[in-house]
Amino acid sequence: MATGAPTNNNCIADLESANATILTEILTLPLFGSDSGSCSPTTSSAVDRLQQTVSSIDLSVNIPDHPVLGVFGYSLESNAFSGKYSVAMPDVQTLIGLQLGFSIAVFIGVLFAAILYRTVIRNNNEKNEKQNSTLRKATIGSVLLLTCIFLPYTLFDAMGVQSTVVRFTICTSFVLYMFRILEAIFGFVPTGAKSSLGVYCTYFSLPFDMMFDEETFKPIMATKRDILNGQINVVKAVTCLCMLCSILSPYDYAPFGETNAGEFHERIVMRDYLDARHLGNCFAIAREFHSFC
């Protein structure tokens, strides 16, 4: 779960000052491809100190030696489960990168929503067929769809994003925007979402389904119980993610061993990709990424 920490000849101490901004702290993280050198503890950034505090939490468990175990007629060799087991703690830099990447994606989504609302949605409400012609919709939709396809890669290069998790988070938002764009172009936007610019921007940019009252078409606000259930689900997801990383990280996230399946740009051999071990490794990674959704 932790990301690699490249090195830089210039110490972060040169950037540290009493008036250092949070943005400067974030942009110097190795998550975004900056190279930070090893500095003394007194000049460590706040993020580095927080990461050290989190990493110092010891959640390891030592299981002592045990004899041969018999289970349902099967026998397990002695000390099959003995050893030290530990839980992988979240990486602070990755969490900050997730938050920043998601915030940038939402901001871009708001811009897309404002463009669609001013040029398509509002014209639909006014039933102005001349302004809202098929050619106009096709042009706006095509431009926004192409932007959704290529803009994430531009952001990766501009920010120097190296973490696969952050890339996945940013791309997920743009996939959602592509469906929202098609929905607006073909006229399937819910009536409640078109009530105002603010409501439509929220509906378009945030990755959750908004519910609207069937009579007033106003958004239905979440109850305290809904908020509590959401917080419980977040805790469950984080717990599941920590457990998965704890299990997969000792195997370099390939629990079924290395396979002959190459990268996407290499020659594809179908039998290598259909190998049971390769499919098992893909399932393990897919299950881990599902925890982020």
Image (cartoon, helix red, strand yellow):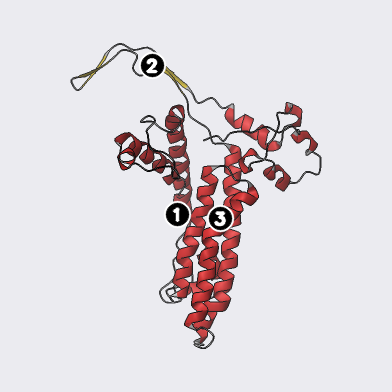
CA gap, disc 2 to disc 1? 42 Å
Residue 5: % across, % down = 62, 33
* SS state under label 2: loop
Does the residue at mark 2 contact the one at mark 1 (Cβ under 8 Å)? no
For residue 152, the mark is 3
**Measured along the vertical axis of the image, is residue 207 above or below residue 255?**
below
Structural distance between the alpha carbons of marks 1 and 3: 36 Å
Residue kind at label 1, given as amino acid type = Arg
Q: Which residue in the structure is indicated by mark 1?
A: 225
Q: Which residue is mark 2?
A: 82
Q: Position of residue 94 (x, y in %)?
A: 57, 41
Query: What residue sits 29% from the left and 14% below the top?
Result: 77
Q: Is residue 197 positioned above or below 255 on the image?
A: below
Label 2, residues with CA under 10 Å away: few <14, some 14-19, many ≥20: few
**Residue 101: % across, % down:** 59, 51
- SS assignment at label 3: helix
| First reached walking from the N terminus: tag 2 or tag 3 | 2
Distance from label 2 to label 3 (Cα)? 46 Å
